[in-house]
């Protein structure tokens, strides 16, 4: 039994923890309090962990100080969602204590101190810590280990004691947080954290986990759900190929011709054009041919080819999957946005999903769109890239989702030389309405104040569908029902979409309301929109109604009422 942790052992421990979480992350997703299709705590946490593991897998150092430092940096940049940010801060706290070690290994006492440092840093990351969450689990487990310190002789003893206490703490979370008790679940962030600790303990016992292949997702989603939590391990096309071409003549370039040819040669195709630049990403068995095809249209600016079949053990396989599966949709569009050469007074960054919604935000003056939000929470690194790209004196970030705010706020510490404000917009509706009062002739704080006031005085609602039977706030919910959400509560659940939306509108439209903005989704037809518009007018005939074809998935309607 080990009584010290070297860099090599710590690397094995955190890698095993990440793999155990990844193998079980769908189970964590299903602990979501709301029965919505995009419950993604497990996905956010495993993607955050994988970002850290990717960094340490390339590290040769045997020192726990080095491994912990690189892990912390990787997690910080890859942190997605609130659970991912808290997880990254936990390991940052672990590193802050391990950094004090004089040699390359941690003793049992030093490891216990690091676990305490982890919980303290995690608490500091959240402005108003909520008990009954992952925070409680990391704190109570560390406190228990401190109490038992004299009886713990080995690393295995520490992790056993820590894990037992963490599990007991997780079981108590519904008593601390009523919303968990009502939904009949334990805290998903705490449950994900326990998967990491289980993997770490197994590594300390000499057992190495491998990545399990997921054959299919257990939850069957309606048409229109893209299933971004589903991994696809089928490597029929072995080379991930990316290149950017500067077109000789953009007027003569036909996107469809190149797209159709590449589709014959592979899959996972993303093709984006921005004036004279074309970015291509494709999985193919003929990378050279794909690049030559692109070269016919202009000069190659950059190119990258990776062999996805090369397996340096299970971790590298998992990292490739992490990079080449979940991040395709997110990264392709965002990394393509070039840095603005001239520094401007203002730069606005917004997190959006749905082609129509993105277009509407651009029309209101947003300089940089980060893809995702409701269905895929972007990592901190994407906010940092966006801040660099907008090249502005004053930057306003609109996260447009309560689960994205923490990741966005991390840019404040990581881009200290920049003048950044994160407006705490919790929905697309809030972000959209706040842009209506933005004025680039005004000072930054005046704009933030005016935008915050709008956000504070408005009401928003979303209509999606339920993935399980449950009951919340006295509302009985059946799987497959359309559910209306406002102010963090499900207020209506009905099998008919129009009736459900009408029920939601009844709750959020008042006599004093003046403007309603309605974003409708991919599978909603124009006739249904006309019917809804009539219904809104019947509730309040003086309302100004704006209807936008958002083309978003999962959320059939997003409503903003001012």
Image (tube, rainbow, N blue to C red):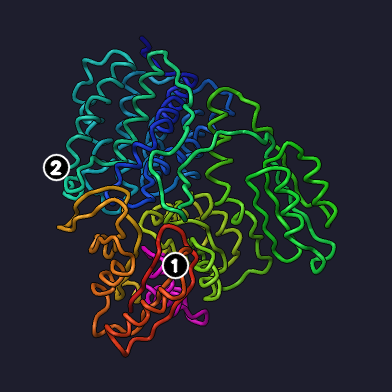
Please, is residue 261 above or below residue 277 in the view?
Answer: above
Q: Please report the residue visible at 46 percent of the width from the left and 59 percent of the height from the top.
A: 553
Residue 439 forms part of the magenta stretch: yes
Residue 225 percent across, percent down from the top left = 45, 53
SS majority, magenta: helix
Residue 392 sits inside the magenta stretch? no
Q: Which residue is mark 1?
A: 524
- For the residues bearing labels 2 and 1, Cβ distance under 8 angstroms: no
Q: Residue reaching furthest top?
A: 1
Q: Tell me which label, 2 or 1, sits earlier in the chain.
A: 2
Of 110 and 85, nearer the camera is 85
Name which residue lies at 19% across and 43% down. Answer: 184
Q: Residue at x 34, y 25 (%)?
A: 198
Q: Is residue 368 visible?
A: yes
Q: Is residue 448 positioned above or below 193 on the image?
A: below
Where residue 204 appears, x then y in whole percent?
A: 39, 17
Pointer 1 local density, CA inside 10 Å: few below 14, some 14–19, many at least 20: some
In which quadrant is the N terminus drawn?
top left
Q: Quadrant of residue 403?
A: bottom left
How far apart are the two marked residues, 2 and 1, measured between alpha carbons? 41 Å
Q: Position of residue 304 (x, y in %)?
A: 72, 42
Tell whether 367 sits left or right of 376: right
- Discs 2/1, front: 1
Task: Name the residue tied to disc 2.
Answer: 175
Q: Can residue 433 be seen from the camera position used here?
A: no
First to last magenta residue range: 423-452
Using the image, determine if residue 285 lies above or below residue 65: below
In the figure, is residue 242 to the left or right of 56?
right
- Element type where label 2 sits in the image: helix
């Amino acid at each position: 039994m080990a009584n010290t942790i070297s860099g090599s052992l710590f690397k094995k421990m955190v890698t095993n923890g990440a793999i155990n979480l990844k193998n079980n992350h769908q189970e964590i997703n299903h602990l979501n309090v709301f029965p919505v299709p995009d419950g993604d705590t497990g996905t956010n946490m495993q993607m955050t962990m994988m970002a850290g593991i990717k960094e340490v897998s390339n590290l040769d150092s045997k020192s726990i100080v080095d491994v912990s430092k690189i892990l912390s940096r990787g997690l910080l940049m890859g942190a997605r969602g609130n659970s991912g940010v808290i997880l990254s801060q936990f390991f940052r706290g672990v590193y802050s204590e391990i950094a004090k070690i004089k040699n390359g290994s941690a003793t049992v006492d030093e490891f216990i101190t690091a676990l305490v440092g982890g919980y303290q840093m995690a608490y500091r990351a959240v402005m108003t810590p909520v008990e009954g969450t992952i925070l409680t689990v990391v704190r109570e487990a560390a406190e228990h280990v401190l109490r038992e310190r004299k009886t713990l002789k080995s690393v295995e003893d520490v992790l056993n004691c820590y894990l037992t206490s963490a599990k007991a703490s997780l079981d108590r979370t519904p008593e601390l947080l009523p919303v968990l008790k009502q939904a009949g679940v334990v805290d998903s962030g705490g449950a994900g954290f326990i998967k990491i600790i289980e993997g770490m303990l197994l590594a300390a016992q000499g057992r190495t986990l491998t990545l399990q292949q997921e054959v299919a997702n257990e939850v069957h989603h309606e048409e229109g759900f893209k299933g971004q939590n589903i991994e696809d391990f089928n490597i029929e096309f072995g080379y991930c190929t990316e290149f950017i071409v500067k077109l000789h003549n953009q007027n003569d370039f036909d996107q469809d011709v190149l797209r159709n040819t590449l589709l014959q040669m592979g899959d996972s195709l993303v093709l984006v054009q921005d004036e004279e630049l074309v970015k291509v990403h494709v999985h193919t068995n003929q990378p050279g041919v794909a690049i030559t095809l692109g070269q016919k249209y202009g000069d190659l600016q950059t190119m990258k080819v990776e062999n996805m079949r090369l397996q340096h053990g299970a971790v590298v396989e998992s990292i490739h999957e992490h990079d080449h599966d979940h991040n395709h949709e997110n990264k392709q569009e965002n990394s393509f946005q070039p840095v603005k050469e001239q520094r401007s007074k203002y730069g606005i960054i917004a997190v959006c999903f749905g082609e129509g919604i993105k277009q509407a935000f651009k029309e209101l003056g947003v300089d940089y769109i980060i893809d995702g939000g409701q269905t895929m929470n972007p990592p901190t690194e994407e906010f940092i890239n966006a801040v660099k790209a907008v090249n502005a004196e004053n930057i306003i970030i609109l996260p447009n989702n309560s689960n994205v705010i923490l990741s966005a706020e991390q840019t404040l510490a990581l881009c200290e030389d920049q003048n950044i404000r994160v407006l705490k917009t919790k929905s697309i509706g809030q972000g959209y309405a706040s842009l209506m009062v933005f004025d680039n002739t005004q000072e930054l704080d005046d704009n933030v104040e005016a935008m915050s006031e709008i956000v504070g005085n408005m009401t928003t609602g979303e209509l999606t569908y339920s993935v399980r039977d449950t009951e919340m706030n006295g509302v009985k919910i059946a799987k497959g029902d359309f559910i209306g959400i406002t102010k963090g509560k499900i207020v209506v659940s009905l099998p008919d979409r129009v009736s459900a939306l009408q029920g939601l509108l009844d709750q959020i439209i008042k006599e004093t309301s003046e403007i309603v903005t309605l974003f409708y989704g991919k599978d909603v037809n124009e006739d249904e929109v006309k019917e809804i518009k009539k219904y809104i007018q019947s509730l309040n005939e003086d309302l100004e109604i704006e209807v936008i074809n958002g083309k978003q998935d999962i959320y059939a309607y997003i409503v903003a009422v001012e």
